[in-house]
Image (tube, rainbow, N blue to C red):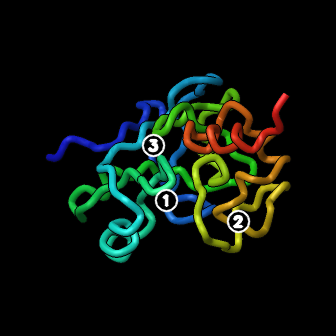
Amino acid sequence: MMTPLSYRSPKTEVRQSKIHGRGLFARADIDKGEIVAMKGGHIVDRETLRREITPRLGPVEIQIDDDLFIAPVTEEERESSMLYSNHSCDANIGMRGEITFVAMRDIRADEELTHDWATTDDDDYSLECKCGAPNCRKNLTGKDWQRPELQKRYAGYFSAYLARKIAMLAPGP
């Protein structure tokens, strides 16, 4: 058996999700700030991702810089790299650094663990959201991190990459 590329807390498990396919769920209570998962894989550029990886493996990456992503590169690595954290507009996990997901609040056992793609993505896409949250945006884009209300809501929980971009947009003193 292959060593997993990604880490999922023993307090989590993958099972069927109402949001999409399989999702990551809390098996036990998780405290605010606790590490839920860490994404593992290979560092690839955008061209490699779009040309070679996504056509074969689907959406399997997390963006870590303008032109860099962490992703599995083979079918054999796909399952051990996947976190199964679906998107939600009312997310309960966010980023610490580039690859670490932490609880943004106390999470009860059996809750689905979700992150808002606005905390990780800077890309050119737009798609219909089906998360079902009361505050659902209905349409997700790869530029949602630029929305002031999301910057405020997820302050401290953006990937380090996006936090740097947000800081550069802030007006000076």
**If you read the primary sequence from the N terminus, does the residue marked by circle 2 or circle 3 appear first?**
3
Figure quadrant of residue 143? bottom right
Secondary structure under the numbered disc 2 in the rendered image: strand
Q: Nearer the viewer, residue 45 or 38?
A: 45
**If you read the primary sequence from the N terminus, does the residue marked by circle 1 or circle 3 appear first?**
3
The reply to whether the C-beta atoms of the residues labelled 2 and 3 are less than 8 Å apart is: no
Question: Disc 2 to disc 1, how far (Cα)?
Answer: 20 Å
Dot 3 alpha-carbon crowd within 10 angstroms: few under 14, some 14 to 19, many 20 or more: some
Q: Nearer the viewer, residue 8 or 54?
A: 54
Residue located 59% across and 55% down the image: 121
Q: Nearer the viewer, mark 2 or mark 3?
A: 2
Q: Position of residue 62 (x, y in %)?
A: 47, 52
Q: Position of residue 131 (x, y in %)?
A: 70, 61
* Amino acid type for the residue under numbered disc 3: Glu
For mark 1, what is the residue?
22
Question: Disc 2 to disc 3, how far (Cα)?
Answer: 26 Å
Q: Which residue appears farthest toward the left when viewing the image?
A: 1
Residue 93 shows in this picture: no
For mark 2, what is the residue?
140
- Relative placement, left or right, of 27 versus 1 is right
Question: Which quarter of the rendered picture does the C terminus lie within?
Answer: top right
**If you read the primary sequence from the N terminus, does the residue marked by circle 2 or circle 1 appear first?**
1
Question: Disc 1 to disc 3, how far (Cα)?
Answer: 10 Å
- Relative placement, left or right, of 71 versus 18 is left
Dot 1 alpha-carbon crowd within 10 angstroms: few under 14, some 14 to 19, many 20 or more: some
Q: How many marks?
A: 3
Q: Nearer the viewer, residue 14 or 52?
A: 52
* Amino acid type for the residue under numbered disc 1: Arg
Residue located 34% across and 75% down the image: 51
Figure quadrant of residue 166? top right
For mark 3, what is the residue?
13
